[in-house]
Image (cartoon, rainbow, N blue to C red):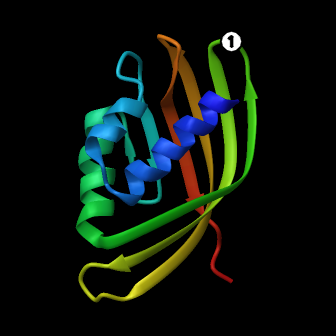
Amino acid sequence: MDKINYLLEKYVKSINECDLELAREIWDSEGKVSFIHPNGYEHSFEEVKEHFYIGTMQRLCTKRDLQIKNISAKFDEKTAFLEFSWDFFATLRETAEPIHTKGRETQYLVLRNNKWKISNIHYSQEPIV
């Protein structure tokens, strides 16, 4: 579980800092990748990089603070399935307006060369009440 927690720390950092090299390090480059989110459905790391990291996180926000909680993990020797909740605080680039969204996320991980890699993410925002 320590290696999975380490991967999650890197994942959060990759989003908060919009660090494309760190993102490349944590996504599975050897297998198929998918990322389902409210703004799209990406089918490769290059699409994740271009449409999510650059197109959404970098283009829309000047500051990002993803916080994850309630992590649940099921894993075997070479795969893991994670579920967690998150809070996302950001500052919109265009208006400098602060935003706060909440959501749920699942991640499917694979073990490659003794390192956990993200293969699939599916997240959704919690309904605004």
- Residue 3 is drawn in which quadrant? top right
User: Could you tell me how many numbered marks the image carries?
Assistant: 1
Q: Identify the residue at image location x=28%, y=70%.
A: 60
- Residue 6 is drawn in which quadrant? top right
Q: Identify the residue at image location x=28%, y=89%.
A: 95
Q: Position of residue 85 (x, y in %)?
A: 67, 57
Q: Position of residue 47 (x, y in %)?
A: 28, 40
The residue where tag 1 is placed is 77
Give the structural element (helix, strand or loop) at label 1.
Answer: loop
**The C terminus sits in image quarter:** bottom right
Mark 1 neighbour density, 10 Å: few (under 14) some (14–19) many (20 or more): few
**Residue 39 visible (yes or no):** yes
Q: Position of residue 12 (x, y in %)?
A: 49, 51
Q: Identify the residue at image location x=46%, y=59%.
A: 38
Q: Is residue 54 above or below residue 30?
A: below
**The N terminus sits in image quarter:** top right
Q: Position of residue 57 (x, y in %)?
A: 33, 61
Looking at the rendered structure, the kind of residue marked 1 is: Glu
**Residue 40 visible (yes or no):** no
Q: Is residue 123 above or below residue 89?
A: above
Residue 103 or 98: which is nearer the viewer? 98
Residue 5 or 42: which is nearer the viewer? 5
Q: Is residue 18 above or below residue 106?
A: below
Asked if residue 79 lies left or right of residue 90, the reply is right
Asked if residue 101 lies left or right of residue 22, the reply is right
Residue 110 or 13: which is nearer the viewer? 13
